[in-house]
Image (cartoon, helix red, strand yellow):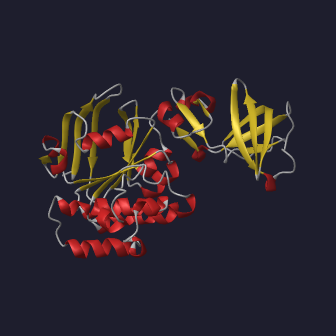
Amino acid sequence: MSYLKIQNLSSNPGDFSLKNINLDIQNNEYFVLLGQSGKTMLLETIAGLNPCSGSVIYKGIDISLLPTEKRDIGFVYQDFALFPNLSVEENIRFSAKYKKIEDADELFNDLVDFLKLENLLGRSTQALSGGEKQRVAIARAIFSRPKILLLDEPLSAIDPTFRNAIMKSLKDIHRRYDVITIHVTHNFREASYLADKIAIIMDGEIKQVGDAREVLNNPINIEVATFLGFKNIFPASMLGDEFSTKVYSVDPNVIRLSKNKDMNTDYIFEGIVDECMGIIDHYKLFVKVEEHQFFIKILKRDYEGCYADRTHKIQIGFDKKDISII
């Protein structure tokens, strides 16, 4: 049985709509939502902040029939939404004002220790850094003992220096405190590190959902592949009749070059150099093969100059194992 089942969920509170969202989330699964639009609206609809049709079912109980305050959901917004008139400790303990928190002092002390908040408890939240605010916001959400934790772009305002440490904390939180976590982000690296499962949401619809590695490496269609940053998307008929009705993509970093027709790769094409750009430690090469332009990255340490001048003919090659059929 799914711990959290989102079934035929639709919402149309304004100019944008969620359309027939279906998701299954298991216990202790870190679930990440990636997409261009609709991510925050989906979190808010799960939390009961938007009118909707469909169901949000937690352990067999339809919580979409309950008011927001009865759903036991912790929500951490992108801007953290801390109370500026309260201290850090008062912010964390705030939920105790309206509900009984089981083992409240024990939980508070554990959160303070786990998120390293000891030296911040008496301070005003207005004097905190972005990373400190983020940890306080998470502690406040967990202190309410939610069944579901919703995180809306929680790392977007964090200094990159501290991002890895905070990601490590997030990775541990949902197991430590037995809470289902749904994390919204636009950062693919963040999603890759954190997610057990990923859903791609575009135009208010789920386009693909599955194991994180599978989704990030094997997009279901060109729309998702383009969103995920896949390069060199061409008709698979270039590779022969085996894939004639599909398209494929090949990573710019795995394409090899040769001037002398001595390639030892599964696929070899002759092309003409359109452009070469030097970027710190590598070159970006653009090579025209018939009507298609390949984008290739080559390390400066491996080549003198840009390997080939504009208008020069070169061979490019790559292996079957390095292509993604879409």
When asked about the image quadrant of residue 203, the answer is top left
When asked about the image quadrant of residue 85, the answer is bottom left
Q: Reply above or below: 189 against 294.
A: below
> Could you say where residue 318 lies in the image, as x and y percent from the top left?
67, 43
Residue 79 shows in the view: yes
Residue drawn at 21 percent across, 71 percent down: 104
Residue drawn at 60 percent across, 46 percent down: 322
Residue drawn at 76 percent across, 39 percent down: 285
Classify residue 117 as left or right of residue 218.
Answer: left
> Could you say where residue 139 lies in the image, as x and y percent from the top left?
33, 64
Residue drawn at 16 percent across, 69 percent down: 102
Q: Total label count?
A: 0
> Could you say where residue 94 lies in the image, as x and y percent from the top left?
25, 61
Classify residue 80 as left or right of residue 322.
Answer: left
Residue 167 shows in the view: no
Choose between 291 and 195: the one closer to the eye: 195
Classify residue 118 as left or right of residue 179.
Answer: right
Classify residue 203 as left or right of residue 255.
Answer: left
> Could you say where residue 130 lies in the image, as x and y percent from the top left?
48, 58
Choose between 150 and 116: the one closer to the eye: 116
Choose between 48 and 88: the one closer to the eye: 88
